[in-house]
Amino acid sequence: MNYRHIYHAGNFADVLKHAVLVNVIRYFERKEAAFRVLDTHAGIGQYDLSSGEAERTGEWRDGIGRLIDADLPDTVAPLLAPYLDCVRALNPNVGPDGGIKSYPGSPRLARMLLRKQDRLSLMELHPVDFETLHAAFEGDYQVRTTHLNGWLALAGHLPPKERRGIVLVDPPFEEPGEFDRLADGLAKAHRRFATGTYLLWYPIKNGAPVAAFHQKLKELAIPKILCAELVVRSERDAEGLAGSGLVIVNPPYTLAGELDILLPYLKTCLAQDRFARAGSFWIAGETAHEKEDGR
């Protein structure tokens, strides 16, 4: 329980995760009916990029730092605008000289997008991070914070009373077996809330059992599972994160087409070496062929 996301806030993995999350939330808002966003590993909600921890790694500079002032193609701009608008709202002085000081984690992004009828449930186990998270949303009647192991929320907090929901599962991957834990957690959650949309984040790095994880997801017999991956550098490096993936269960019908536009651009914008690649593919349902740029 030593993981602190402040070291990685705003990096390329956050860009992928948060751009997709924002577009999924916006899709849910097409219907008037209320929905709930449940974040099982919420962190502190918002991050100070000028802090010593964030500056120590500087990962945000090769993530949101590259993207915030980029000249976006006309096809890409509508897909990134809602996400980037949220980041800019927290950084009114952002400019070419580098004005990003605050980065919204998933909780803050979700809260910025909610309508008055929607709700947000946040789980965090780290005691210090939970206190920060709770203070950030204290008094907000649309947000519930719970000091809880997020894995337990997949059983105990589903289905939401709104009967419409987005479940983000973004574990720290500190311990062995986290890929199996993620697949098992999805199986339990889906049995309780089969119509929910789930976003499951995972790391791509040397030795990560990604193929076995995908196979285990396929064996769950869930009808629709879409996957997006963004790799910014060679996976052969012994240390560090080379890329990340996002599994989307019951994705909006528009999402696959949006990813076909978004991912090639993110690869171009965020690549750190010539081995960068990005693409989306169906693990279950729709089409079986992979759509990928750069593999």
Image: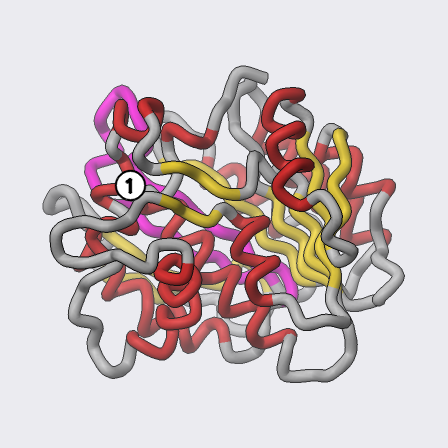
Residue at the image point whose x is 20% and y is 40% from the top: 233
Residue 266 % position (x, y): 26, 59
Three-letter code for the amino acid on which mark 1 is drawn? Trp
One can see residue 206 in this view = no
Residue 278 % position (x, y): 29, 56
In the figure, 174 relative to 157: above or below?
above
The residue that label 1 is drawn on is: 60
Query: Residue 43's quadrant in the figure?
Result: top right
What residue range appears in magenta? 225-250
In the figure, 58 relative to 169: above or below?
above
Between 247 and 20, the one nearer to me in the picture: 20
Is residue 214 inside the magenta stretch?
A: no
Between 13 and 95, the one nearer to me in the picture: 95
Residue 27 % position (x, y): 58, 76
Query: Residue 130's quadrant in the figure?
Result: top right
Between 37 and 91, the one nearer to me in the picture: 91
Q: Could you tell me which quadrant the N terminus lies in?
A: top right
Side of 118 where 210 appears, left or right: left
- Helix, strand or loop under label 1: helix
Side of 127 where 275 appears, left or right: left
Q: Could you tell me which quadrant the C terminus lies in?
A: bottom left
Residue at the image point whose x is 67% and y is 32% from the top: 124
